[in-house]
Image (cartoon, rainbow, N blue to C red):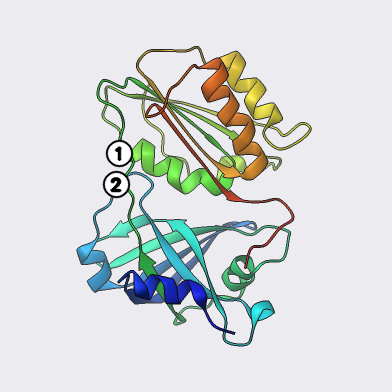
């Protein structure tokens, strides 16, 4: 079966880069960090909040040699060692990305491609609201790590599990983190909590990512409750519950 995604990216002049796994860390039984070596790639990287790459992974359900791409946020970039990390949520639903991450071993070689798209805070922002599920955690941490001290981060993550205290969280003085238990459909409890906890502000920016239904609920809060206009908010769904894309 033809890899149309790779063909499109070749036509756009987007190069693939070989990366080698050098370390695997199981942060929790459902959250795995994989460290890759790619000195030439890392040397050329420009890291900014939510900077991400496309990882090519085998997808045998689509064909013996089929590769599918998935997007992941850079973590733990080490320019001196020429390494970077990616973090994987090991969903209960079978899918090529989770299957690949579970079976990964040190020494395995994969390919990645860079399609950078920078998101910048509007000038004068003093509060950033970051919301999502744990698939958004690497991107949320990248935001908090990069913020100026004059900007307060308010983080809200919806999750059903009891191991959240073991997950990576970048904390700074003055910021707040809230973990919300899911009730009803994904995002309903998160949206309700946001409406109660966050007041509209003229110097506010909001960002959200995660499961599609969750993001839909949070996007409504951004527009209807916070009254944010285009340029003051960004949202993107990463996955759809019960569905594994090609």
**The quarter of the displayed image where residue 27 is located:** bottom right
Q: Can you see residue 50?
A: yes
User: Mark 2 against mark 1, which lies toward the viewer?
Assistant: 2
Does residue 108 sit above or below 212 in this rendering? below
Q: Residue at x 37, y 68 (%)?
A: 113
**Regarding mark 2 in the picture, which secondary structure is present there?**
loop
> In x, y percent, where is residue 20?
39, 77
Does residue 88 sit above or below 154 in this rendering? below
Disc assigned to residue 48: 2
**The quarter of the displayed image where residue 140 is located:** top left
Is residue 224 found left or right of 154 in the rendered image? right
Alpha carbon of mark 2 to alpha carbon of mark 1: how far?
A: 7 Å
From the image, which quarter does the C terminus lie in? bottom right
Q: Residue at x 59, y 37 (%)?
A: 215
Residues marked 2 and 1 touching at CB (< 8 Å): yes
For label 1, count other residues whose C-alpha is less than 10 Å away and answer few (under 14), some (14-19) or many (20+).
few
Q: Which mark is first along the chain, 1 or 2?
A: 2
Q: Decide which of 132, 29 is in the foreground and name it.
A: 132
> In x, y percent, where is residue 64?
62, 87
């Amino acid at each position: 079966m033809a890899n149309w995604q790779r063909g499109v990216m070749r036509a756009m002049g987007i190069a693939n880069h070989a990366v080698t796994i050098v370390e695997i860390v199981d942060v929790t039984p459902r959250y795995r960090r994989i460290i890759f070596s790619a000195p030439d790639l890392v040397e050329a990287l420009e890291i900014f909040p939510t900077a991400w790459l496309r990882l090519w992974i085998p997808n045998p359900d689509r064909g013996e040699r089929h590769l599918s791409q998935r997007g992941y946020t850079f973590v733990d970039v080490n320019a001196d060692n020429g390494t970077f990390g990616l973090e994987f949520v090991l969903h209960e639903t079978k899918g090529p990305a989770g299957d690949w991450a579970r079976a990964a071993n040190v020494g395995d070689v994969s390919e990645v491609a860079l399609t950078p798209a920078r998101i910048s805070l509007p000038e004068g922002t003093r509060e950033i609201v970051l919301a999502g599920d744990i698939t958004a955690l690497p991107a949320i941490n990248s935001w908090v790590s990069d913020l100026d001290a004059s900007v307060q981060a308010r983080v809200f993550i919806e999750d059903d599990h009891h191991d959240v205290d073991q997950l990576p969280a970048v904390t700074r003085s003055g910021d707040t983190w809230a973990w919300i238990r899911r009730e009803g459909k994904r995002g309903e409890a998160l949206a309700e909590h946001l409406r109660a906890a966050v007041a509209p502000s003229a110097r506010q920016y909001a960002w959200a990512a995660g499961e599609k239904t969750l993001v839909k609920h949070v996007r409504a809060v951004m527009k209807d409750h916070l009254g944010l206009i285009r340029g003051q908010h960004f949202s993107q769904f990463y996955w759809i519950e019960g569905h594994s894309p090609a």
